[in-house]
Image: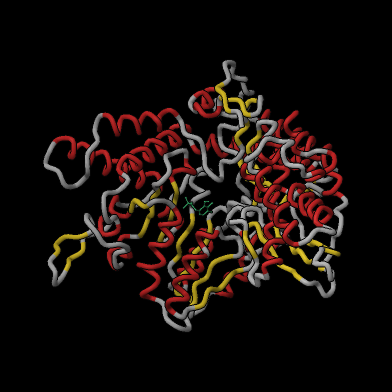
Amino acid sequence: MSVEVASQKTVPDAAPQGLDVRAVRLDFPALHQEIHGHPLVYLDNAASAQKPQAVIDALVKGYSKSYSNVHRGVHTLSQRATDDYEQARSTARAFLGAEKDEEIVFVRGTSEAINLVAWSFARPRLGPGDQVLISHMEHHSNIVPWQMVCEDSGAELVVAPIDDRGQLDLEAFKTLLSAKTKMVSLVHISNALGTINPVKEVVAAAHEKGIPVMLDGAQAAPHGAVDVQALGCDFYAISSHKLFGPTGIGALYGRYEHLESMRPYQGGGEMIRYVSFDKTEYNVPPHRFEAGTPNIVGAIGMAAAMDYVTGLGFAEIVTHEAALLDYAHQRLSAIPQVRLIGTAEHKASVVSFTIDGAHPHDIGTILDHQGIAVRAGHHCAQPIMDRFGLPATARASFAFYNTLDEVDRLADGVGKVIDMFC
Amino acid sequence: MSDLTSLYQEIILEHYRKPRNFGALDDPSFEAAGHNPLCGDRVKVSLKVDDQGKVSEVGFEGAGCAISTASASLMTESIKGKSLQEARELFSRFRDMVTGKNEVGDHDLGKLEALAGVRDLPIRVKCATLAWHTLQAAIQGEAEPVSTE
Ligand SMILES: Cc1ncc(COP(=O)(O)O)c(C=O)c1O
């Protein structure tokens, strides 16, 4: 695969909305390269997003100017690293709309956050006959940890249905909430379908019955402002790498009284207050859940990404992405062989599709040869694929740095697939 | 897109549209199922062996991409009349070709050489070898579906 830095950048169209996409694109070095002789069109943002220079700079600075371990040295560098790391926690708190910094636990990502809540919060509250409620549109990360705690406790995993457009059946969901339900965990925005779930209503309905709710915000955080207090949820998980930040870091929001009531997830340094061979006293949250040396510079990089995105403004991002989604739907649905998978009324800029007569894998390869990066596969959400009777789909997922021109490139690329196969 | 047309040669597209020996055999001597977790593709291979120990009939079933379907179809054509040992050897030469172990043209693989372009796309090697792995599992009598992972 040829990857070269193009000497001449193609200048994208300026968005008609508030966001100056042309300028924004200049912040992302990875966008300006050629793939197979074509300017890259990066439409795999739901898998992982590219990084702005501000994030790259924060990582370089973190390692070159203020690096040391946190919370343990008396020396200046350790103090600096600790300050930056805790400042990153504050940034994440503000980004998610949490009340206190102590409600933010740094984790490796959404998967780890869900595992942490499953084992440290839910597991001790689960027994035979109890239920955990999820939906049919979950990522494997929001299925498997719950299966594991259910198997361990004798509880049952219950799955709320979705309709043919890929929307949660809210009425069915509500009727599944019962005295047996001990935990609800739901994806905020579906990675495979783009569906935006009515999470506020879900939280309210669950809370009416005293059931705690975890939200998987991996795909929601890059597409709109999150306010955990307004949502009222008990836990919220995000991954930095989908939010234009580094890999290996993410944040778990947990209501403080929950975190305080929870047993540790892993043992080690940092998470203790006092250790003897007879008894160990655990540290207070969030440190109780951050055993060992954390991803210090990762947290700093994630905070830089949050600052960057917040600086662009979610109002502008949402408007621009809505225009991209509309146009992509319009162009793709004009092609008779294309079937859109996931047509929810409330939808983020994720377009899953199939082409009659062409397998998603071949679609992915042929688009790649035209410089267009999309995902082809089951998107770590096999139950949804089964729901739609498909082994896989092709998925174009847009970020704020994508342009209407790139939608045209995608649609034209799909046209070439059809020329070849159909 | 020149490298693309070498990957998706006309013969591959043709076998994809009209796969040969498609369907399961009744009463096969050997059969097995294969799965590529990366794309969710599944394939079943069944074969009959005659008194001479040669493959007399072979069939495959399953939905897959152009590369995996064409590869399965070409495989069924190429192993008919061969002994199981010859079929295994063919797989080993085929695998060397798609993983780029030898120069193209060095394989003496006939029509199967249409799949040589896969060598430039490591991620698609599994598509090209799924049916072959499944064939091998069938011959070895594996009960569990084989996986390309
Ligand atoms: C909806 C959703 N949940 C969870 C995850 C898992 O995130 P991570 O791999 O960063 O832990 C993803 C990412 O693929 C996702 O899209």
On screen, residue A171 above or below A79: below
Residue A149 is situated, as x and y percent measured from the top left of the image, at: 44, 72
Extreme-front residue of the structure: B52
Q: Quadrant of the C terminus of chain A?
A: top right
Q: Which residue is more in the foreground, A344 or A275? A: A275
Residue A328 is situated, as x and y percent measured from the top left of the image, at: 70, 39
Rendering quarter of residue A271: bottom left
Q: Which residue is more in the foreground, A412 or B120? A: B120
Is A236 displayed left or right of A43 in the figure?
A: left
Extreme-top residue of the structure: A8
On screen, residue A49 above or below A359: above
Is B134 displayed left or right of A311 in the figure?
A: right
Residue A24 is situated, as x and y percent measured from the top left of the image, at: 52, 26
Q: Residue at x 74, y 47 (%)?
A: B67
Is A389 displayed left or right of A88 in the figure?
A: right
Q: Which residue is more in the foreground, B57 or A322? A: B57
Task: Look at the image and tell me whether residue A395 can be seen.
Answer: no
